[in-house]
Image (cartoon, grey):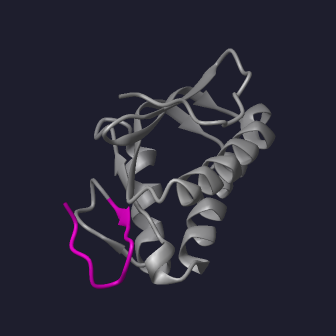
Amino acid sequence: MKVRLRVPSVNDPDFVADFDHGEVAVLRFVGSADNNATAPLAELLATLHDELRERNTREIVVDLRGLDFMSAPCFSQLVTWLTRLQELAAHQRYRIRFRLNASINWQSHSLAALRPCLGFHGSQSRPSASRSASSSPK
């Protein structure tokens, strides 16, 4: 069963953010997240975070495989989202798994840089902000 959450859309012809909450919650980014997408992306991630907490979602997959470019301000919004997640009590956290496109260099380099500061677990190609420090990656 797919459920559409009350998340705002990102109205940018070069960037698509699509969210499905089926058996697995999946957030897909496609295109180019330039500076024009920063404010809508911030709103989407904040609203999505609240929805995931309300629904007691345990895990979300963030699929970046179709994302060619992400500006520094948009990437900062991802960092803000991850920081909000880490600020929650361990029992309130959900896991975030990233699906990357190995042929797009910025994805692995940028996400790998977040690993030490946000407690990521898992392989370099799939960092995941886990529900608790002791949980193992899937």
Considering depth in this image, is 113 or 80 the residue closer to the camera? 80
How many marks do you count on the picture? 0
Q: Is residue 18 above or below residue 133?
A: above
Considering depth in this image, is 124 or 2 the residue closer to the camera? 2
Residue 80, located in which quarter of the rendered image?
bottom right
Image side of residue 136 versus residue 6, left or right: left
Image side of residue 41 versus residue 105, left or right: right
The stretch drawn in magenta includes residue 137: yes
| Range drawn in magenta | 127-138
Residue 15 x, y percent position in the rendering: 62, 24
Image side of residue 28 versus residue 100, left or right: right
The stretch drawn in magenta includes residue 89: no
Q: Which residue is located at x 44 percent, y 79 percent?
A: 91
Q: What secondary structure characterizes most of the magenta part?
A: loop
Q: Is residue 123 above or below residue 28?
A: below
Q: Which residue is located at x 39 percent, y 72 percent?
A: 131
Residue occupying the far top of the picture: 13
Residue 133 x, y percent position in the rendering: 35, 84
Q: Which residue is located at x 68 percent, y 15 percent?
A: 13
Figure quadrant of the N terminus: top left
